[in-house]
């Protein structure tokens, strides 16, 4: 249930003329219920930013875009409101309505750290991703209930922790979702103390294998060779575990990008957008404008 809504019309109409499209931004608050790694239930209200282009045909297919995770509590607290405005605008230009949830434990949403997975030597990864997936599923349900949204056409995608969350969602094959896109997904990485060597990578491999055993929707995995969180080898191993489990997917590893390829999603859109657009169009999405 949405308990608050703020409508924000961006300045595109004023800047480009009234006959041009407007990027409409909404901010809603959505109560959700999850469990942490100890099985403790947590009920909290999350902030969700929603974008759509009012010149695109309706009903819109939906896209839910998940953000990453910082291991530092102060950075999670100062996170603000997740928007990914440039990427969200690009997705709206491909016809989508885009929701970007700020998950529990971050910025404007606040609350406890339900994604905590324990010390490096004793990691318990799955509960955190399931908590993030539960929030994503609640956002999907929110969008599917809108009269301007197609209830049976949708994509879930995300960066880093959000990328792995997209795979956790795919493993549950929710109604209305046909594709999942994982940008640099994983966990336990720390480029400052252990570059390219995340905590307990084999445990992540087991988790991804489990996701693959139930996932039936196509997935696209995008990484860079110089990802300083996960390195060049672990992501491919995780993908192979996912595929061995039975999950359908395609793996793309870009050449080294900047000082840290983990930032490919944020800073390298001109590289990955053509590949993502190809994936979307292959599966019947993004039949609108050319990417910008």
Image (cartoon, rainbow, N blue to C red):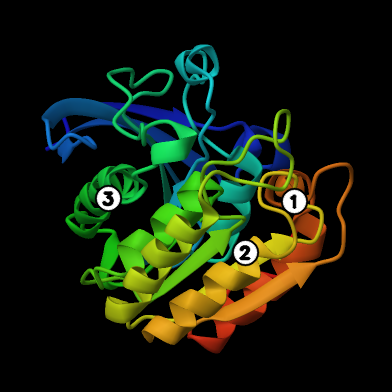
How busy is the neighbourhood of tag 2: few (under 14 within 10 Å), some, or many (20 plus)?
A: many
Q: Are marks 1 and 2 in contact (CB under 8 Å)?
A: yes
169 above or below 13? below
Q: Is 274 displayed left or right of 88 in the figure?
A: right
| The N terminus sits in image quarter | top left
Residue 291, how many percent across, how many down? 71, 65
Compare marks 1 and 2 and give the one earlier in the sequence. Answer: 1
Q: Position of residue 189 (x, y in %)?
A: 60, 41
Give the label, 2 or 3, closer to the camera: 2
Q: Are marks 1 and 3 in contact (CB under 8 Å)?
A: no
Spatial CA span between label 2 and label 3: 20 Å
Numbered mark located on residue 227 in the image: 1
Between residue 266 and residue 62, name the one nearer to us.
266
Q: Position of residue 166 (x, y in %)?
A: 41, 59
Q: Which residue is mark 3?
A: 130
Q: Quadrant of the C terminus?
A: bottom right
- Neighbor class of circle 1 (other Cα within 10 Å; few <14, some 14-19, many 20+) is many
**Label whose residue precedes the other's in the sequence (2 or 3):** 3
User: Label 1, label 2: how many angstroms apart (C-alpha)?
Assistant: 9 Å
Q: Are marks 2 and 3 in contact (CB under 8 Å)?
A: no
Say which label, 1 or 3, has the lower sequence index. 3
Q: Is residue 213 left or right of residue 269?
A: left
**Residue identified by numbered label 2:** 235
- Element marked by disc 3: helix
Q: Note whether 261 is above or below 175 in the view shown.
A: above
In percent of width and height, residue 64 lies at: 40, 53
Q: CA distance from mark 1 to mark 3?
A: 24 Å
Q: Secondary structure at mark 2?
A: helix
């Amino acid at each position: 249930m949405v308990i608050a809504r703020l409508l924000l019309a961006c300045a595109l109409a004023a800047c480009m003329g009234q006959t041009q499209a407007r990027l409409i931004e909404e901010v809603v608050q959505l109560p959700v219920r999850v469990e942490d790694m100890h099985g403790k239930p947590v009920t909290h209200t999350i902030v969700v930013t929603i974008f759509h282009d009012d010149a695109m045909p309706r009903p819109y297919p939906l896209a839910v875009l998940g953000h990453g995770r910082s291991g530092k509590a102060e950075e999670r607290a100062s996170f603000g409101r997740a928007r990914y405005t440039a990427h969200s605008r690009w997705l709206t230009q491909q016809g989508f309505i885009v929701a970007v949830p700020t998950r529990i434990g971050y910025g404007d949403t606040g609350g406890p750290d339900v994604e905590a997975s324990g010390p490096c030597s004793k990691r318990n990864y799955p509960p955190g991703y399931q908590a993030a997936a539960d929030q994503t599923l609640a956002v999907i349900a929110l969008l599917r209930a809108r009269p301007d949204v197609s209830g049976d056409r949708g994509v879930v995608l995300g960066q880093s922790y959000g990328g792995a969350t997209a795979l956790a969602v795919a493993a549950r094959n929710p109604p209305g979702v046909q594709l999942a896109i994982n940008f640099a997904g994983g966990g336990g990485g720390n480029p400052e103390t252990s570059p390219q060597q995340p905590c307990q990578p084999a445990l992540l491999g087991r988790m991804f294998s489990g996701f693959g055993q139930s996932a039936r929707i196509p997935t696209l995995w995008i990484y860079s060779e110089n990802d300083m969180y996960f390195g060049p080898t672990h992501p491919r191993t995780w993908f192979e575990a996912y595929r061995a489990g039975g999950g359908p997917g395609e793996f793309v590893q870009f050449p080294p990008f900047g000082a840290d390829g983990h930032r490919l999603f944020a800073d390298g859109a001109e590289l990955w957008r053509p590949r993502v657009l190809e994936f979307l169009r292959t599966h019947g999405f993004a039949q609108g404008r050319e990417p910008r």
